[in-house]
Image: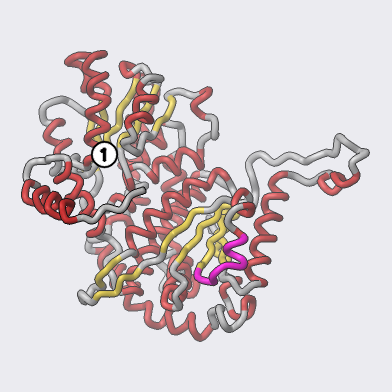
Amino acid sequence: MPLTLDYSNVMVENIGETHGISESMLQTIIQNGHDVYNTLKEKAVQDILGFYKLPFDQQLVKSIKDYAEVARGRFNNYVHIGIGGSALGPIALQTSLRNSYYNFNEKPKMFYPDNVDPDWIQELTDHIDVSKTLFHIVSKSGGTAETAATALHFMRYLNEALGDDFYKNLLFTTDPVEGLLNRIASEYPIKCFRIPPNVGGRFSVLTAVGLVPAAISGIDIGQLMQGAAEMAEICKTTDLKKNPAFVYAAIHYHYMKKGKNISVMMPYSNKLKDMADWYRQLWAESLGKRLDNDKNIVSTGQTPVKALGATDQHSQVQLYVEGPNDKVLSFLEVEKFNNDHSLKNYFTYIKEFNYFEGKSLGQLLNAEKKATELALTNNERPNLTIKFPQIDEKSIGAFFFLLESATAFTGGLLNINAFNQPGVEEGKIATYALMGRGGYEQKKLAIEKQLKKKKTFEI
């Protein structure tokens, strides 16, 4: 198995009856979960939920590998233009599977400007030669305000540098048929990869959205997909107590019903730091819903929080151990680090350093994780661990699929639609109106009327 889910520290045997889960409680959720399992399976078979089949698309892997080989030879820089689900997965792939200082020595240098802060964007623009840069614009609709505006920013410099040949430095990943990027691609011979219509942005990391930049930076996307495929097979098991995605979902579902509405993901690895960022969007956008599937107002959801071990033992753990018992913690643990050397006490007159002799930084980091785990458990704070044998393409692919599947199961248990985002759409519409986009004139008038009535309190 590419990953292990250790949920010992949510069970009554380890954290007590007040905050623990008993075997009978878990079995009740499992009994009710078979309908959820069957519903999701049927939607996958019918191609309503496309993420289930992504790990098995070998044709896509080959086409991306072929493209990436050419791109790596042509360009000195790669700029990924997308936001939310179009950026968080690609960023997590880069930081987990490439050297942390990749851009110092490798080509093409990889950049992910996933916000429209003008100073930040300009600072990047000033440090790249746009004539030798591939700009990968990722948007299913092509109309996402932040993505479109960032693309237009760089178009100014591309036009200045390349004139009518600007399109040779563009790559689109978008809808197969619809969307504004397809209108541009109908005018210019721009290479396009496709986002399946049945795959939402936050579930798209194993499409061209994530695979293209991964392959360009030298990640073995074949192994990545193999790890995801292995986990997909594991998550198909109908014995739900042996299904890690369902067990993860069942635990969080149980605690949400008990009022523990904060989910902390705490990797004990800097390589996995941005995986927690990716998880935050997946969990928040999928589960934070006002209405259930029967149109009842439920206002459900669990707030995902990102922490980093051991750094945040010195900032957040005090709250988690002694503050409100309203959280579930998920640790990410690496059992074998790729670089982990023995320490030696070079200051023999400092006896207090002797205990480091023959130990390693990896041993220290995992000891710190165990210490935090014990402190939480001793204070009846539910926590579980996802264990990575090591950080490689297979384990990262497995993690992506495990959490996507767990999210789908959790949405099913909550009887909500985990695959839409009406709250996000409301904000998008307001942004279009405020920026004067055509077709949103009435919305703009309504916003202006609302703002006139606003009572302002400032100091």
The answer to whether residue 188 is seen in the rendering is yes
Q: Is residue 339 above or below residue 327?
A: above
Which residue of the protein is positioned furthest toward the right in this rendering? Answer: 349
Corner quadrant of residue 14: bottom right
Residue depicted at x 21% and y 55%:
454
Which residue of the protein is positioned furthest toward the front in this rendering? Answer: 459
- Residue 325 within the segment the image draws in magenta: yes
Left or right of 258, for residue 179: left
Corner quadrant of residue 180: top left
Instruction: Measuring from the top left, give residue 253's x and y in whole percent.
Output: 42, 73
Residue depicted at x 31% and y 16%:
131
Neighbor class of circle 1 (other Cα within 10 Å; few <14, some 14-19, many 20+) is some
Q: How is the image coloured?
A: secondary structure
Instruction: Measuring from the top left, give residue 386's x and y in whole percent.
Output: 55, 59
Residue topped by disc 1: 146
- Residue 450 within the segment the image draws in magenta: no
Q: Quadrant of the N terminus?
A: bottom right
Q: Amino acid at mark 1?
A: Glu
The answer to whether residue 227 is seen in the rendering is no
Left or right of 128, for residue 168: left
Q: Is residue 34 above or below residue 227?
A: below
Left or right of 342, for residue 65: left
Residue depicted at x 39% and y 59%:
283
Decide which of 124, 391 is in the foreground and name it. Answer: 124
Instruction: Measuring from the top left, give residue 36's x and y in whole percent.
Output: 33, 74
Residue depicted at x 30% and y 39%:
82
Q: Which range of residues does the magenta coloring cover?
A: 318-326
Q: Is residue 330 above or below residue 15?
A: above
The residue tagged with tag 1: helix, strand or loop? helix
Instruction: Measuring from the top left, give residue 89's x and y in whole percent.
Output: 39, 45
